[in-house]
Image: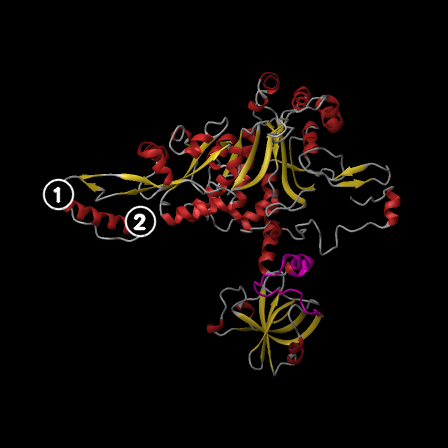
Amino acid sequence: MHAYRSHTCAALTSANVGETVRLSGWVHRVRDHGGVLFIDLRDHYGMTQVLADSDSPAFKDVEKVRSEWVIRIDGVVKARAPELVNPKLPTGEIEVFVQDLEVLGAAEELPLPVFGDVEYPEETRLKYRFLDLRRESLHENIMLRSKVITKLRTSMIDAGFTEFQTPILTASSPEGARDFLVPSRLHPGKFYALPQAPQQFKQLIMVAGFDRYFQIAPCFRDEDPRADRSPGEFYQLDMEMSFATQEDVFGVIEPVMRGVFEELGGGWPVDQEFPKIAYRDSMLWYGCDKPDLRNPLKMQVVSEHFAGSGFKIFASLLEKDGTEVRAIPAPKGGSRKFCDRMNAFAQGEGLPGMGYIAWQAEGWPTTMVGDDPRIKTANDEAARYHTARRQGKAPTPPSPIEGYEFSTKVVGVGPVAKNIGPERTEAIRQQMGLGEGDAVFFLAGRPAQFEPVAAKARVQIGTELGLTDENRYAFCWIVDFPMYEKDEETGALDFSHNPFSMPQGGLEALETKDPLDILGYQYDIVCNGVELSSGAVRNHKPEIMYKAFEIVGHDREFVDGHFGGMLSAFKYGAPPHAGIAPGVDRIVMLLAGAENIREVIMFPMNQRAEDLMMGAPSEPANEQLRELGLRLIPRD
């Protein structure tokens, strides 16, 4: 028999009853049932229940073990009584009676528990990550990550792509984040940079004549951490293809993403269509460029209904250039309680509040017309009836009065409706397609200032009203990004997305159009409100690249100095090429249903970019600094 195991802790079934087996693993927990000791023995593969009674020669040894000790047991497989079968475990039909036990690795008192779902401070979890990784949920996330990478790799190979590795030690290049610098011992005073992405190298691979490239690429950026972004390093499915258009990239990536999410998404349906949404439309409808399409709500501009109106706050704002009023619909959100909650939400986001209109019916079915004194009584009953309906009850409607007509009337209520009047209120209702029991919420000013709050409000409304279909994956492409953006304070132009992108219209557009009107062949892929990747059709023509950088104030010397290797290659015959790089960490995060990206990375850093387990970053020894020709200068 093998020195440590004949089977794993997930392998034994009723077919093994009567066999003598050997298992090794961690003691998940120990239970004492009046002279019978039970151990849940755990390894990478699963769990097996082993036990010893007072007649077992190993009973005294079993009494000594504690949680997370590593042990080897020899024993006989027996069937559990039918009422004791555990259907949740693959080994739930059997248990192993221990005949011999060897302690392979004792454990000290644990700094955090492995058994159960007790939450511990993240600092403790990261310092003892090797223990944290033993927990079932985290173990499953890391295994899911491995499956995702395997699926991505096989999908790309099946699509005709070849995997290549690009350098880790390279030159610094401005790609939107801070570099990690590595000092050179052989070249004192000079530094390598860890790649923020293999951007230039993968384009050079296309110039070198390799048609379809991919790799599961490590990337390094000295950025502040967020819930969906790990500090320091991350991995992406980096790909590039020659003689390719934007649509060619979509045609490759869509089936790859669909396949990963269908196979590993826990049975959730995956939308088959990946709609293409222009950046400007996305900002207008959703307030952001990474919309969650499981939420059906779309904002609309309603400025015309407030211009010159009695609602002076909005009317005066609209007299200023660049301002507008947008409306967020809230189907069945017309209750006073919900409107008050949304107003409080806006205040929590730093706004004075959020104007709204709610629509409700009056009378029976709205209001009866006529002079009969019985009408007042009937309308009072009707008012009580509609109040009960708005409270979610199902009251019996009042009886109509014979010989009289009824009018149908849905009216807007609230301060906004009162100030703009019934005609404008009705026009807003018609534009937004709303009716009785619905509401609409307004934000006004310069779009860039209120869009972040509008985006959050749309999500909040969709969630609270149950409009967002949580259990599915909805992808989309955001396209037609502007090539340039203007800093509102300085007025300076800068690239809004990727400086290596091909402008729509090429060199002619750069020479003849207002830079803020130029669009790029740039695109993002988004799933359930999470941006998975940016990509672009690359600018492979030196004259276009020089002009593109000239617009943001960089001369040829700057371009040659920072991108000389790539530009030199482009001068010797470069094919049109395009690519993208979906983030592996974010894909796994979505599939695992994790709220923090550190839950899907094996050894992540903390919020301060520290590895608490290994003690990084650490201070270098003086000998190391001398060898590198470096001296540390304290910060002021």
Name the spot of residue 43 as percent of width and height, x first. Answer: 63, 63
Which residue is rendered at x = 71% and y = 28% of the image? Answer: 208
* Residue 447 visible in the snapshot: yes
Q: Is the magenta stretch mostly helix, strand or loop?
A: loop
Question: On screen, 12 above or below 580?
Answer: below
Q: Callout 1: helix, strand or loop?
A: loop
In the rendered image, residue 623, in percent from the top left (x then y), is placed at 88, 48
Q: How many labels does the image show?
A: 2
- Residue 372's disc number: 1
Residue 270 seen from this side: no
* In the displayed structure image, the side of residue 619 where residue 72 appears, left or right: left
Q: Depth check: 607 or 60 in front?
A: 607
Colouring used for the render: secondary structure
Say which residue appears at 64% left-offset and 25% top-offset. Answer: 539
Q: Residues within 10 Å of mark 1 (few under 14, many from 20)?
A: few
Taking the spot 66% from the left edge, 50% from the top edge, the residue there is 607
Q: Earlier in the sequence, mark 2 or mark 1?
A: 1
Under circle 2, the secondary element is: helix
Reading the image, the residue beneath label 2 is: 390
The amino acid type of the residue labelled 2 equals Arg
Determine the residue positioned at 86% across, 45% down. 625
Any magenta on residue 456? no
In depth, the one of 383 and 240 nearer the eye is 383
124 inside magenta stretch: yes
Residue farthest along the left direction in this orientation? 403
Question: What's the residue type where badge 1 is placed?
Answer: Asp
